[in-house]
Image (spheres, rainbow, N blue to C red):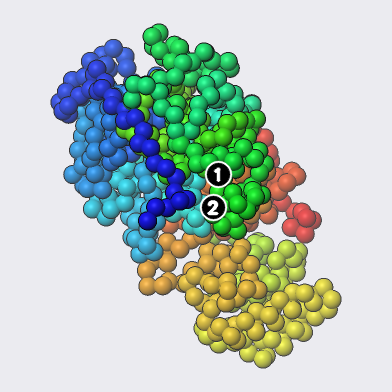
Amino acid sequence: MHDQYAVKQVRGPYVTLSLHPNHCSTEQELIEYAEERRSQGAILGADLFSGAGGLSQGLVNAGIEVVLGIDHYQYALETHAARFPGMSVDWDLSTSDNVARVADLMKEAGIEVLAGGPPCQPFSKAGRSGIRHLVENGERDPDDQRRNLWRAYLEVVQLASPKAVIMENVPDIALDDEMFILRSMVTELEQIGYSVECKVIDTWRYGVPQFRQRFILVALRDNVKFEWPKEVSQKVSVWNAIGDLPEVEGGDRPDGGGDGFWDYSGPLTEYQTSMRANVRDEDKDRIYDHITRPVREDDRQAFEQMTAATRYSDLPEHLRRYRSDIFVDKYKRLDENDLSRTITAHIAKDGYSFIHPRQARTITVREAARLQSFPDDFRFSGPPSAAFKQIGNAVPVRLGEALGNGILNAWERNETKHYVSKDVVESLADWYRQQPDSGLLQPWLRTKSRWKIVVAEIFLLRSSWTETRFLWQLIDNLEEPEIGALPSDQTIATLRSVFAGERFKIRFSQFETLVEQMRENPKALWEPHIDRAKLPVLNDVLVRTLELSAPISDGTDSRSEEPVIVAKGVLRVTSRFLGVDTESRNKQSNGRISVGKLLGLDKNSREGHLALFEVARQLCVSEKPYCGVCPLSQMCDFAQRRGGDAEQPPEPETLF
């Protein structure tokens, strides 16, 4: 039956591209070509999981010639092979043989820069535990490691030892509770002599006219220090990027099929001029790939009524073909004076989230490419749907160029990074172990008793040092309930008598609520991963604190279950240590990353993490920090710049 609501499908022109003049068909050809280019002074790179080559193009713009691209999407490989010299191949990097093949080829060809965005699937708890054991001991198990593509990527680094490594991915790779993937990568790369920097980047800060966040890791061999490139001060708006492109109707196709073009009158802005920089002379007045989907009449009416502020649910009911309670922003017109929304591969299926800011249609292939900072001479193999997919999956070219320039600048400076995560956590953990209970503000965190920790957190958190010394001893001496049992009447009575009065009224009420919830779920407090639905009185931070300081095994190695906890004081420590503001900007992304990066995956990471809490509250205080007695002072840029004496901090009650 004919679907009256279906979007009419019009097969777009199929773009067929010729191979790059210096395309290589075999590995030996690539090795010979690479030798010639290196003799001419070229710096060579490889792009794994390259897609069409957004990152490759950015590196080329910076002065790094990409001669090896690997991907599994055929249209993207065809695009890459047409745009870049060397080899563009479909090799399955989940196999040990191909990992070794890539590493060997990189070494023989003298490829010094490795870039790529491997998919990062999550590991099972048992898998994380096994990997962590290997990482902590500096061991390798290639068969296990290569079952996941980010592990394969690290294995290529370990085998090929390139001078520079760039890895990009979605921000979520670094934002899970344990930050396992990030911490694994940092530690393993540092173990083999790389300095590592990583953060979540807003790509608009490098001149991309789009709101798009990416996780970026840069590692330089021989512990060379990397500094993030300077950011731009102004955003490039949508209209700044595409306002010079001629008006077209949805579904229109120029004559000439894949080689068809529209007349073009020239760029109007600096960004547009940069997009036209390498267009051939014969194409100066032509624009290619400026085509999009046909537009249904009811969609056209909807588009014409919309502004950038219009929500799908604001449209008249007869123009809404989808449920507006579910698809609140099903249709979205781009704001010409602001950044574009994030372009993803889904644009290959529909463009409703990318309605042209002035015309009643979705954006064209060329407009999408412009918003990803692909230059106008960059063509995409296949039909329009394949082009959209390649563009949506790409790393913005301008981001790749900034990273490439950052690497070249780091090599020129040739400064050495002054610390690795292993040194940081060892210093923290050693200091923490040497402190007596009387010298800690939260001595209960090292009891390994969840019951004592939760009681102390309820009643003693932010108490004065004097109160803590006295009251903690009382709590520590109370009878501890067995797993699955409630505290005794005597324990409750003792706590009621000690924490009587108005001051503790709310806290004791919280404790009584905890007991009631434990009555309904007797074992909930002792589950390896506490379910807050069973103990809702406990907030997220307290739950993670319990799992960090008192881990309980679920049959695997419990060391792998180590959440990263970001508190204001801890962010103050990492901000000063790294010389980057993570207290006020991007606390939940780069703030977490700064903590995870310092901790790494090490046998001392757990105690090092607990030590951070104490350092933040006792030493690295807001006013007049006590750098002279801080365990991180010899590695901390802030402490080295500030100097500081060895004065002992006062009793904590005078610090707040």
Kindly state the secondary structure of the residue where label 2 is placed: loop
- Res. 498 image quadrant: bottom right
Q: Residue furthest top?
A: 281
The answer to whether any part of residue 294 appears in the image is yes
Evaluate if marks 1 and 2 touch, with contact meaning CB atoms under 8 Å apart.
yes
Residue at mark 1 to residue at mark 2: CA–CA distance: 9 Å
Residue at image position (58%, 64%) is 545
Q: Residue furthest bottom?
A: 489
Which quadrant of the figure contains the C terminus? bottom right
Which of the two residues, 263 or 468, is positioned nearer the viewer here?
263
Near mark 2 (Cα within 10 A), the count class, few <14, some 14-19 or many ≥20, is: few
Which quadrant of the figure contains the N terminus? bottom left
383 w.r.t. 570: above or below: above
Measured as percent of width and height from the top left, residue 123 is found at: 37, 58
Which of the two residues, 211 or 554, is positioned nearer the viewer here?
211
Measured as percent of width and height from the top left, residue 84 is found at: 31, 23
Q: Considering only order in the chain, which callout, 2 or 1, is on the residue closer to the N terminus?
A: 1
Relative side of 650 to 537, left or right: right
Measured as percent of width and height from the top left, residue 440 is found at: 65, 62
Q: Mark 1 — residue? A: 298
648 w.r.t. 59: above or below: below
Near mark 1 (Cα within 10 A), the count class, few <14, some 14-19 or many ≥20, is: some
Which amino acid is tagged 2?
Answer: Arg
Residue at image position (46%, 16%) is 263
513 w.r.t. 259: above or below: below
Which of the two residues, 409 or 288, is positioned nearer the viewer here?
288
Q: Mark 2 — residue? A: 321
Which amino acid is tagged 1?
Answer: Asp
The answer to whether any part of residue 156 appears in the image is no
